[in-house]
Amino acid sequence: VKRASQFKFRLYVAGQAPNSVLAVTNLLALCRSCLSERHEIEIIDVLREPKLALANGILMTPTLVKLAPGPGRTIIGTLSETETVKLALGLETVAA
Amino acid sequence: VKPAPDLTSAGEIPRLIETLVTTERRLVELTGGEVDAVTGAEGHMFLLQRAQEQLRHSEAVKQAAILNALPAHIALLDGQGVIVSVNDAWQRFDRANSSPGHEHGVGHNYLAICDQARGANSGEAGRVAGGIRAVLDGSRKHFSIEYPCHAPGERRWFELMVSPLLENPQHGVVVMHVNITERMRVAEVLQASEQRFRALFDQASVGVAQSDAVTGRYLQVNRRFCEIVGRPAEAMVGLTFADITHAKDMAESEDVVARLRAGLIREYTQEKRYVKAGREDVWARVTISAMWPAGRPPDFFIVVAQDITHRKQLEDQLRQAHKMEAMGTLAGGIAHDFNNILTAIGGYTELARMKLTDNPGVKGHLDSVIQAVKRAADLIRQILAFSREQPLERRLITLQPIVAECAKLLRVTLPGSVDLELVSAEDAPPVLADETQVLQVLMNLGTNASQALGGRPGRIQLKIENFLVEAAHAAAEPQLRAGYYARVSVSDTGGGMSPETQRRIFEPFFTTKAPGKGTGLGLAVVHGIMDSHDGLITVESHLGEGTTFHLYFPAHVPEAGGPSSAITFGVRGHGEKILLVDDESIFIEVGRIALAGLGYEVEAVMQPAAALELVRANPGRFALVITDQAMPGMTGLQLAAELRTIRPDLPIVLTTGYSLALTMERIHAAGVAQLLLKPTTARSLGASVHAALSGQPISTHVSNPPY
């Protein structure tokens, strides 16, 4: 069995805007419950660093980008629908 | 010429706005309302309106929450002083403290409210208005004021602070109003505590000073410290211990301070002298302590000083008294030996004179020798008086001549401005007294009276009277008995004495005179002399009204029968056998010849034991025994007592030059009939033998009666 790999996320937010704050809160909760001790999160405030969003092709905030492990995924929104998010990020295998 | 508005663009703008709103609404629809911002073509972020509103709202809520949570009453004023906004605390305070219709809520002009204030705090209100205007017009950066604003039943203080809202104060100011009652109470308590300690410091009965540990300068001194060192507090500031310490104590003080500074000791007590400006040095017991703030060298010293000058003086006096006593003992011993030699000289001279029948020239020479012997005896008496071993020689005398003599002597020493008055009552009764000692007492009191006048004009009165002590008076004074007294009073018109001083004047070493000016023994000796005369001395005095000393001498009541005075001269014996006991061969020799010359038959022994044997062998053999008091093995008194057990009616004459240890009680108890003081002469010897043989009451015989 292959050892569980390290997850790397990058979350683009718009300052303290409500949806962005919600997205940060949801991501932290998700990682705590499913990926404890094996994740890295980088949060980028596009209001402070607008050029970074453009360079990475981010059109809206909040936007979560899964950098590792592959395949890469991009999720837009508050990450409130936990099951859907997990599925999109490959955190749970589909039931047999 | 200004171009007219472009009609095309005027139509386009509403369309663009429509597009903007529609675009945003569509974006929200597409993202399910979960997006905050979108990225523009140049990387600019467009925060969607909903997010903006939410952000604004949440910021405002937070700020309002913070402002409302503050206990300070806060109001925002605009450039004209109108209240634009207030926090909850302001509202609550306003509701609680403003009368209806006079609220300071939003919309009111705070400047106008302050300007129109009347009553207790109108003064502060005026200053607040001025402060707000100053901050508004930029002439002041901030303004604050503390003021009391007491509500019924409650003491309150407030601080009002005014700060500009933004960089430009014309945008308005923030007024903050804080209740500082607690702080003021603490300050009040601290102040009260400080005052209490200040009082403790100032009123302490010991001297307390604080001095800088580095410079040694006095920082503060209390009232008592100033008194001890004899300088006002203003003069002490800037001085160091070295400025007021006596040169002889400087080395120790410097050493102490150095060791305190170095931390070798924390506290030190020494007895040292301070130099008083223009006065005598003062002795003080000084404790100096270093005050250590945690771990650092001492900041300052605390000095506690007590004036022990009086104690030091007492110690000096005691030393002086001991010295006097030692000298007295020495002088007394020498005087004793001299007495024996004088006895020999006087005795042989008298014998030679008695045997001389017909040679007036030689007789004259011998008389001169006898005169010289008397003078020598006088001198010895004076030495004994100094050594306080002078025997009491109480004889029946009248006091008037002595009082007159005292007045005469005193007159010489008094300045012309002092009026000396002598009041002498003829009927003052005769008393049993020692003339020399009475004169000593009177001179002592007279000198005191003169000193009480202190060189100022005044009056001294010497008075002798016949004084009847009533029963009530006697009951009040245990030492007095009802009856007649010769009362001698010495009065002055000086400054008088306080009751405290009067209580203590008869104590040894108590003196009101300057150190070195009096031993404090004078009145103590006077008191002792009056005691030994069965008399009493009392004092009457009031401050500013002079002093009177009264001397009470009990009137002598002659015993029924028999003559009261025992002094009889020239009585010759008729062959009575006399036993003479003395360890000094000179006295035996002189006594034998003198008594033989007076017609007595004399047998002499040098040991008391031999005398006992002779009497025991034949108790009736001797008509009289004369014995010396000071003999090896057995004293004259012991011998007398032994002899009386053998033969109770045997008359005994005791001779002594040195009657310190003899009291009349002991002499009586031993059965001694007569006391004979050395140096003896044929006359005194004859008189005492005659008195003893004729059974006269006991008296003292001296060889040179002063009259």
Image (cartoon, coloured by chain):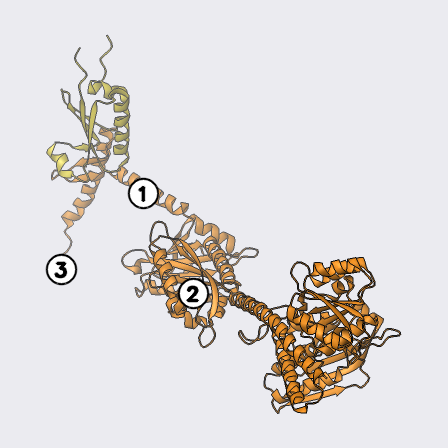
Q: Are marks 1 and 3 in contact (CB under 8 Å)?
A: no
Q: Which secondary structure, mark 2?
A: strand
**Residue B577 spot, x, y in % from top left:** 79, 69
Q: Colour of chain B?
A: orange
Disc 1 residue type (three-letter): Glu
Q: Quadrant of the N terminus of chain B?
A: bottom left
Disc 2 residue type (three-letter): Gln
Q: Which residue is mark 1?
A: B59
Tell me what residue is drawn at x 50 percent, y 67 percent. Answer: B224
Q: Which residue is mark 3?
A: B2
Q: Colour of chain A?
A: yellow
Query: Are labels 1 and 3 assigned to the same chain?
Result: yes
Q: Which secondary structure, mark 1?
A: helix
Q: Are marks 1 and 2 in contact (CB under 8 Å)?
A: no
Q: Which secondary structure, mark 3?
A: loop
Q: Which numbered marker is on residue B220?
A: 2
**Residue B238 spot, x, y in % from top left:** 37, 69
Query: Are labels 2 and 3 assigned to the same chain?
Result: yes
Q: Nearer the viewer, residue B447 or B396?
A: B396
Q: Residues within 10 Å of mark 3 (few under 14, many from 20)?
A: few
